[in-house]
């Protein structure tokens, strides 16, 4: 049995090494894509954003009202596209950088609060040393939910709660007091919501996006097997 056990152990070690190489390759390609976005798309969108804003200013001075409306819309959409490209670049480079998942969530809450006029509250009831099957996937979902609040909710207050469930699962609840989750909004951001669902599936987690009774939206992410 000893040779068999040694062969099995060797095979397991080889599998883990292969998985580590795959993850490193994925991270490397993600960084390459981020660099390409920065060098091409983001720079072009930045140029369009500046020019469209200038065009809108000129149209306000002398153009017909319908042209002013159109130029304002172009400037708004160009600014939105530029902002989203910057967010994609940031997300592509995302890593825990030696931090725990909890620390990274805390940093994300601080970041989005500084980028908006929304007051964000973090209610951590699980401590600092919780880990999941894939902490990066969990962090992606949290960041996307926070980004949606800033983009779409028109909220003044948002809260992120970290809760330990009876079955040792981790619940991450993200809620806001905004305009709520409406059907037309879901179609506009359906791609982002689909990605959130796909990332939850990689964690074997359950993701629920529901309206709050008193207004606003609630995102509940239940992650099984979270380690204290």
Image: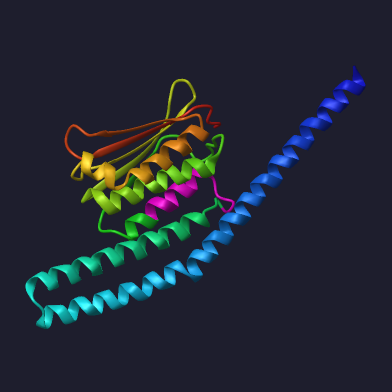
Span of residues in magenta: 97-110
The quadrant the N terminus occupies is top right
User: Measured from the top left, where is residue 219 in percent x and y?
Assistant: 33, 36
Residue 70 lies left or right of residue 96; in this view the side is left
Q: Residue at x 54, y 60 (%)?
A: 33
Q: Residue at x 66, y 51 (%)?
A: 25
> Hey, which residue is sitting farthest left in the picture?
65
Answer above or below: position of 75 versus 183: below
Q: Residue at x 74, y 35 (%)?
A: 15
Q: Residue at x 55, y 52 (%)?
A: 95
Corner quadrant of residue 197: top left
Q: Observer-nearest residue: 227 or 67?
A: 67
Which is the main secondary structure of the residues drawn in magenta? Answer: helix
Q: Observer-nearest residue: 223 or 203?
A: 203
Answer above or below: position of 128 versus 48: above
Answer above or below: position of 153 versus 60: above
Residue 170 lies left or right of residue 190; in this view the side is right
The quadrant the C terminus occupies is top right
Residue 118 lies left or right of residue 173; in this view the side is left
Q: Observer-nearest residue: 188 or 180?
A: 188
């Amino acid at each position: 049995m000893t040779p068999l056990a040694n062969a099995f152990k060797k095979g397991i070690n080889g599998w883990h090494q292969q998985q580590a190489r795959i993850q490193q390759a994925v991270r490397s390609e993600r960084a390459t894509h981020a660099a390409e976005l920065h060098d091409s798309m983001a720079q072009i969108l930045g140029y369009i954003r500046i020019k469209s804003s200038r065009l809108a200013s000129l149209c306000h001075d002398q153009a017909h009202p319908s042209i002013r409306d159109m130029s304002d819309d172009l400037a708004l959409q160009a600014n939105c596209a530029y902002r989203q490209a910057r967010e994609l670049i940031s997300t592509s480079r995302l890593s825990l950088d030696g931090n725990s998942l909890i620390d990274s969530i805390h940093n994300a809450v601080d970041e989005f609060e500084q980028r908006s006029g929304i007051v964000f509250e973090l209610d951590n009831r699980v401590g600092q040393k919780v880990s999941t099957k894939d902490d990066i996937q969990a962090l992606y979902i949290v960041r996307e939910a926070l980004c949606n609040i800033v983009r779409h909710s028109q909220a003044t207050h948002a809260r992120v709660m970290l809760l330990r469930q009876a079955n040792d699962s981790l619940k991450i609840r993200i809620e806001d007091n905004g305009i709520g989750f409406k059907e037309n909004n879901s179609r506009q951001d359906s791609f982002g919501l689909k990605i959130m669902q796909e990332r939850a599936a990689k964690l074997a987690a359950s993701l629920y996006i529901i309206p709050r009774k008193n207004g606003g939206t609630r995102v509940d992410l239940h992650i099984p097997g979270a380690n204290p």
